[in-house]
Image (tube, rainbow, N blue to C red):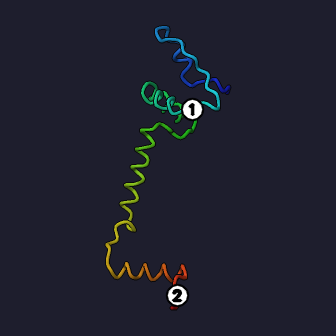
Amino acid sequence: MKLEHIVFRDHHDANPTLPKWKYDYKPGQGYQGLRGHIERYHEEEYLKACQDNGWRVMLPSWLKKEKAARDVALQDSPAARTAFTFEKFLQHLTDWIISDDQVRIH
């Protein structure tokens, strides 16, 4: 695959009503604007290309949804739901001091 090949170029070139744009992206160019453009105008085609090629979806809204899903999963884990008690706090503090060797004799 050549560097200048874009997944949606054939679709765009086949439609004569669309303006002709330059499709060359070089390695040093930014891609944040390209991601937003793909998300706004070519999301379905991009998702199909990701599925067909085994690519990870890198669209901003999908990344936000993925992060939100991870956060919810962490909140629902049993470790995140343990109740706070003063006794547990003292036990964790003691474990930390012992493991980190923070005890000093004055």
In front: 29, or 82? 29
Residue drawn at (66%, 27%), measured in percent from left and top?
A: 3
In front: 11, or 86? 86
| Callout in the foreground (1, 2) | 2
Residue drawn at (43%, 78%), measured in percent from left and top?
A: 92
In the image, residue 43 lies at what x, y percent? 45, 29
Q: Residue furthest top?
A: 16
Q: Which residue is mark 1?
A: 30
Give the SS element for disc 2.
Answer: loop
Q: Which residue is mark 2?
A: 104
Check whether the beta carbons of the residues at disc 1 and disc 2 lie within 8 A of each other: no
CA distance separating discs 1 and 2 = 53 Å
Asked if residue 84 lies left or right of residue 92, the reply is left
In front: 71, or 53? 71
In this rendering, is residue 87 above or below 81? below
Residue drawn at (38%, 67%), measured in percent from left and top?
A: 78
In the image, residue 5 lies at what x, y percent? 62, 23
The amino acid marked with disc number 1 is Gly
Mark 1 surroundings within 10 Å by alpha-carbon count, few (fewer than 14), some (14 through 19), many (20 or more): few
Asked if residue 73 lies left or right of residue 105, the reply is left
Asked if residue 85 lies left or right of residue 65, the reply is left
Give the SS element for disc 1.
Answer: loop
> Of callouts 1 and 2, which one flags the residue occurring earlier in the amino acid sequence?
1
In this rendering, is residue 47 above or below 13? below
Q: Residue furthest bottom?
A: 106
Q: Residue furthest right?
A: 2
Residue drawn at (42%, 27%), measured in percent from left and top?
A: 40
In the image, residue 103 lies at what x, y percent? 51, 86
The amino acid marked with disc number 2 is Arg
In front: 6, or 36? 36
The quadrant holding residue 1 is top right
